[in-house]
């Protein structure tokens, strides 16, 4: 009985194909998928998504979940972060896209100065917002002079944009990609959802490598059989996400995105691969950590957040 690996409860702070390495690991632990089936023996994993502004650190502290998708910045000034560590990096790039509304009359190829005269729906969760501000500063655009709209959750942002609000919207994929495709019914005759925009910029491309999204658990969980099984699988699924054909990956994770066109999901995977979001070590580097801290300092965040206290280094 002592050798039995208990089911692992995983929660994501938001749902996106940006977290494909994690979704692949969850898929291995929740279905009889044939890919890497030999690794999934005795591995059981459940997946849930936090409500908007729900604190995954609190969930871990109370023992409701074992592992969560978060970010190193989530531990800064968080009263629930004590005894919780970041043990793996999911993404080393910002995964947000800027979508321009279809029909905006311009003869220009997109440039950041165009934002000065338009309405922009920007994700106002701390990290996405600070990353967007940082990208603005790198492009010599004064964020304070922009007509920025806070529409709340990503779902509400999309609703507002489809209703005609805003000239640009700032989202992760596939939500951003969904806005660029017509979605047809099963017979391919009737449009269920119309294209309303085009992706014109990738925020990660402007900022460069940093620690964007990570995995967290209680420090004591690092000593368990469940953790060692999970991290073994995550090493493999992260490599799989970066190196396998996007069509293969999209087929595996499509069930997580039933309202997304399969071609849009495949293109999403391809874009994240080309941005090298999942390329590199699973371990969180101090250089990436420091760059993320620099982004937050740019938005006025103060405090001392030692790398060694927040990040687990095996």
Image (tube, grey):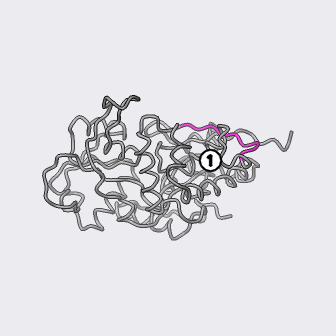
* Left or right position of 153 against 269: left
Was residue 65 drawn as part of the magenta stretch in this picture?
A: no
Q: Is residue 55 left or right of residue 27?
A: left
Q: Position of residue 142 (x, y in %)?
A: 22, 62
Q: Position of residue 107 (x, y in %)?
A: 13, 58
In the image, residue 270 lies at what x, y percent?
Answer: 45, 55
* Residue marked by disc 1: 25
Q: Residue at x 38, y 65 (%)?
A: 207
Where is residue 304 drawn, in percent x and y? 49, 64
Assess disc 1: are there few (<14), some (14-19) or many (≥20) residues with their C-alpha within 10 Å of its C-alpha: many
Q: Which residues fall within the magenta stretch?
A: 40-48
Q: Is 42 included in the stretch rendered in magenta?
A: yes
Quadrant occupied by the C terminus: bottom right
118, 145: nearer the viewer: 118
- Which is nearer the eye, 23 or 140? 23
For the point 35% across and 53% down, the residue is 97
Q: Quadrant of the N terminus?
A: top right
Badge 1 marks a residue whose secondary structure is helix
């Amino acid at each position: 009985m002592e050798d039995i690996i208990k089911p692992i409860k995983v929660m994501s702070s938001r749902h996106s194909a940006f977290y494909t390495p994690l979704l692949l690991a969850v898929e291995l632990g929740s279905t009889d998928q044939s890919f890497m089936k030999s690794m999934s023996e005795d591995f059981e994993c459940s997946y849930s998504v936090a409500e908007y502004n729900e604190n995954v650190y609190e969930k871990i502290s109370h023992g409701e979940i074992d592992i969560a998708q978060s970010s190193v910045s989530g531990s800064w000034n968080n009263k629930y972060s004590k005894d919780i560590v970041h043990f793996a990096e999911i993404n080393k790039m910002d995964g947000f896209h800027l979508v321009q509304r279809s029909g905006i009359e311009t003869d220009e190829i997109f440039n950041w100065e165009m934002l000065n005269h338009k309405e922009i729906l920007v994700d106002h969760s701390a990290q996405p917002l600070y990353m967007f501000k940082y990208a603005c500063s790198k492009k010599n655009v004064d964020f304070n002079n922009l007509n920025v709209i806070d529409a709340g959750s990503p779902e509400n942002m999309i609703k507002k944009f489809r209703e005609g609000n805003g000239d640009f919207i700032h989202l992760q994929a596939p939500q951003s990609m969904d806005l660029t495709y017509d979605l047809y019914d099963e017979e391919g005759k009737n449009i269920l959802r119309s294209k309303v925009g085009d992706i014109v910029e990738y925020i990660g491309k402007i900022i460069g490598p940093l620690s964007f999204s990570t995995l967290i658990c209680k420090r004591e969980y690092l000593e368990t059989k469940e953790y060692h099984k999970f991290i073994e699988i995550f090493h493999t699924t992260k490599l799989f996400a970066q190196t396998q054909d996007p069509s293969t990956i999209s087929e595996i994770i499509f069930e997580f995105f039933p309202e997304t066109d399969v071609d849009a999901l495949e293109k999403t995977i391809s874009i994240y691969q080309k941005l090298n979001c999942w390329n590199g070590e699973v371990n969180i580097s101090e250089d990436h950590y420091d760059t993320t801290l620099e982004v937050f300092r740019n938005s006025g965040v103060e405090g001392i957040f030692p790398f060694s206290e927040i990040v687990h280094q095996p």
